[in-house]
Image (tube, rainbow, N blue to C red):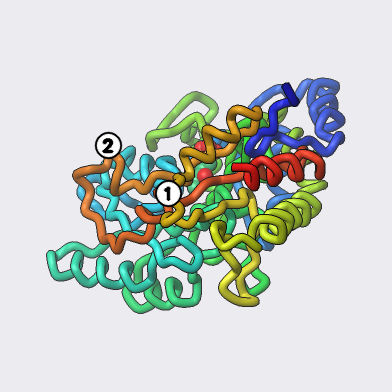
């Protein structure tokens, strides 16, 4: 049996251990220290954001973004339905109601048309949504011009879930920097990883200072332990941040490699009309191509699940697309505005192995097996 070809395995630059060793040598083994500060600086430099807070996860970052936006019990938050559950769970943590919005078919992200329909409908019911959480799925930028325009017109702030989109740009500007807040994730299979971790980025320096305060148990400025706010233990550790600093050195290179992997699949499989690949809808859109996804012609009679099981026999990992949140049992009672797009994508799509740690011969092997299938 060949070695397993993973969907997107961690891929170190080789410099991570230098930063981690430094943390040990100087005994900064704590949820603060030079690596945390250095990693935050790297993130700001890379994204162009004025400030960032390194946290324990992307989910924690989103939770704090909602708290900083004063969202709480009884409020409504608009959010992409076609996403991972972590985009939606924090809305429930703060006691608010997720309003799920389906996708447009070009980028697969939140449909601006449905977004406006939903806002008008919520307003007519006497409730103004408190925020819009935009997800850039698989690294592809959403239709930001249209969405920013709606956000401005209705005066509803945007929180960008750029967990999958570090290294993607829209109009030359990093994703995560368009909204009031952007959230990033460094979980194990993201484009860069710290083993687990996340960050909140914003141009509002004061909000990021408040994020750090809330993420370290909200301790007042007093010699004893005094608290005037509910706090959280969400800060990133200095060890983990060391991995992040090493990863930031090769992020641009990883984006280049991911885009090459996409091109390889498209140029080899895309010639068959059974397989479709999502193009960037215009020159403004630049995806990091975190995962290459393929849409299969549903008239052929073989499903993505058949292909997934076939590849599994050859020790190749592939994965269904995210199951839309409006189809999840846990969110069945949430209001949703749907058009069938994400449901169709879920039924006809598959994520292909896209790890930069895999070799060219691995991708050739995957393509060979897919063509056999
Ligand atoms: C990974 C991911 C998250 C959550 O990030 P964690 O660091 O795993 O908590 C949130 N949203 C999306 C779209 C993701 O893919």
Measured along the vertical axis of the image, is residue 290 above or below residue 239?
below
Residue 237 spot, x, y in % from top left:
65, 29
The residue depicted at 20 percent of the width and 65 percent of the height is 122
Frontmost of labels 2 and 1 is 1
* Alpha-carbon span between mark 2 and mark 1: 31 Å
Whether 65 is drawn above or below 10: the answer is below
Residue on which disc 1 sits: 301
Look at the numbered disc 2 and give the secondary structure of its residue. Answer: helix
Q: Residue 38, relative to residue 299: is it above or below?
A: above
* Residue at the image point whose x is 27% and y is 47% from the top: 96
Residue lying at 86% horizontally and 30% vertically, measured from the top left: 18
350 vs 164, nearest the viewer: 350
Q: Position of residue 201 (x, y in %)?
A: 58, 53
* The furthest residue to the left: 125
- Name the foreground residue: 325 vs 19: 325
Of the numbered discs in the image, which one, if any, rests on residue 330? 2
Above or below residue 21? Residue 277 is: below
Neighbor class of circle 1 (other Cα within 10 Å; few <14, some 14-19, many 20+) is: few
> Would you say the beta carbon of the disc 1 residue lies within 8 angstroms of ligand 1?
no
Nearest the camera: 84 or 175? 84
Say which quadrant the N terminus sits in: top right
């Amino acid at each position: 049996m060949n070695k397993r070809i993973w969907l997107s395995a961690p891929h170190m630059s080789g410099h991570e251990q230098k930063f981690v060793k430094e943390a040990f040598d100087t005994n900064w083994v704590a949820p603060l220290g030079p690596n945390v500060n250095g990693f935050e600086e790297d993130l700001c430099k890379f994204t162009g954001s004025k400030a960032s807070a390194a946290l324990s996860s992307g989910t924690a970052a989103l939770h704090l973004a909602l708290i900083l936006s004063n969202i709480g019990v009884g409020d409504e938050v608009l959010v992409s339905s076609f996403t991972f559950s972590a985009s939606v769970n924090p809305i429930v943590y703060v006691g608010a109601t997720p309003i799920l919005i389906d996708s447009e078919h070009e980028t697969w992200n939140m449909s601006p048309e449905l977004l406006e329909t939903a806002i008008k409908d919520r307003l007519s019911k006497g409730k103004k949504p408190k925020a819009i959480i935009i997800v850039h799925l698989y690294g592809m930028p959403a239709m930001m011009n249209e969405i920013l325009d709606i956000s401005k017109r209705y005066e509803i702030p945007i929180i960008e879930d750029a967990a999958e989109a570090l290294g993607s740009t829209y109009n030359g500007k990093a994703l995560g920097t368009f909204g009031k807040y952007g959230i990033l994730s460094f979980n194990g299979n993201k484009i860069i990883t710290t083993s687990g971790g996340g960050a909140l980025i914003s141009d509002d320096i004061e909000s990021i200072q408040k994020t750090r305060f809330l993420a370290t148990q909200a301790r007042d400025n007093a010699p004893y332990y005094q608290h005037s706010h509910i706090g959280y233990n969400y800060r990133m550790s200095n060890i983990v941040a060391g991995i992040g600093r090493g990863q930031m050195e090769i992020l641009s290179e990883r984006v280049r490699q991911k885009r090459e992997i996409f091109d390889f699949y498209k140029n080899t499989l895309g010639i068959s009309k059974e397989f479709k690949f999502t193009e960037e809808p215009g020159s403004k859109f630049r995806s990091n191509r975190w995962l290459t996804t393929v849409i299969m012609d549903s008239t052929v009679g073989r499903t993505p699940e058949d292909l997934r099981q076939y590849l599994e026999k050859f020790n190749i990992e592939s994965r269904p697309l995210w199951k839309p949140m409006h189809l999840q049992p846990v969110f069945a009672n949430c209001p949703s505005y749907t058009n069938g797009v994400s449901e169709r994508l879920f039924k006809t799509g598959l994520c292909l192995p896209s790890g930069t740690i895999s070799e060219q011969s691995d991708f050739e092997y995957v393509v060979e097996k897919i063509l056999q299938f």
